[in-house]
């Protein structure tokens, strides 16, 4: 399970290091793709396969389903960690997520999310300010 918040830098070649505690989960391969809320998703191959299967099952006749599938699938790239636990974030994904130099890698159960540090700080500040409202809404879902 991926948990926690880790701060890393993107080097001049567009590489970022995966936190050491997560590398073993990604050595068999992983996929990085466009995420939500201006983040990127990094998923182990097994989790990527589950998500891709769900996307393939969306109704082709619905425009929103097609758009979401394209967002996730067309933006996806296989990655391989180098000997130092780094991988290259393709330029189009860095641009999509607004990644500059400082990146926050966030563990979210079955995936990692990569955020520009400034955007992450804004997002968490807003989420913390709205925590009670969010909890109230989730209460109706049984959480």
Image (spheres, helix red, strand yellow):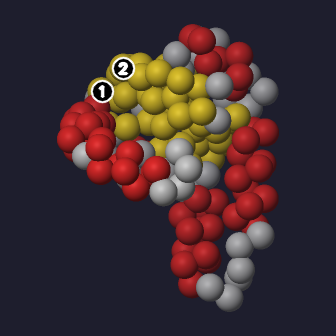
Residue 116: x and y in percent read 32, 37
Q: Nearer the viewer, residue 17 or 41?
A: 41
Residue pictured at 70% horizontal, 34% vertical? 44
Residue pictured at 37% horizontal, 51% vertical? 136
Residue pictured at 26% horizontal, 37% vertical? 128
- Counting other residues with Cα less than 10 Å from the Cα at mark 1, is it few (<14), some (14-19), or many (20 or more)? some
Residue pictured at 73% horizontal, 41% vertical? 47
Q: In this picture, is 48 found above or below 100?
A: below
Q: How far, Cα to Cα, is label 2 from label 1? A: 7 Å
Residue 49 visible, this orientation: yes
Residue 92 visible, this orientation: no
- Which residue is farthest bottom? 61
Q: Which residue is mark 2?
A: 7
Q: Nearer the viewer, residue 139 or 88?
A: 139
Q: Nearer the viewer, residue 112 or 3?
A: 3
Q: Quadrant of residue 28?
A: top right
Q: Are marks 2 and 1 in contact (CB under 8 Å)?
A: yes
Q: Quadrant of residue 127?
A: top left
> SS at mark 2?
strand
> SS at mark 1?
strand
Discs 2/1, front: 2
Q: Which residue is mark 1?
A: 102
Residue 78: x and y in percent read 67, 42
Residue 29: x and y in percent read 74, 32
Residue 80: x and y in percent read 67, 29
Q: Is residue 10 left or right of residue 67?
A: left
Q: In this picture, is 142 found above or below 99?
A: below
Quadrant position of the N terminus in the picture? top right
**Mark closest to the chain's N terminus, 2 or 1:** 2
Q: Is residue 22 left or right of residue 131?
A: right
Instruction: Identify the disc placed on residue 127.
Output: none
């Amino acid at each position: 399970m991926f948990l926690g918040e880790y701060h890393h830098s993107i080097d001049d070649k567009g590489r970022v290091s995966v936190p050491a505690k997560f590398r073993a989960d990604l050595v068999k391969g992983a996929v990085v793709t466009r995420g939500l809320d201006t983040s990127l998703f990094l998923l182990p191959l097994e989790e990527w396969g589950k998500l891709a299967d769900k996307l393939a099952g969306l109704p082709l006749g619905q425009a929103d389903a097609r758009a979401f599938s394209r967002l996730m699938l067309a933006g996806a790239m296989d990655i391989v960690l180098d000997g130092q636990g780094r991988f290259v974030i393709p330029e189009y994904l860095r641009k999509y997520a607004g990644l500059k130099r400082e990146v926050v890698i966030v563990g979210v159960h079955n995936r990692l999310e990569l955020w520009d540090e400034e955007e992450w700080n804004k997002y968490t500040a807003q989420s913390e300010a709205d925590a009670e409202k969010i909890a109230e809404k989730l209460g109706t879902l049984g959480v």
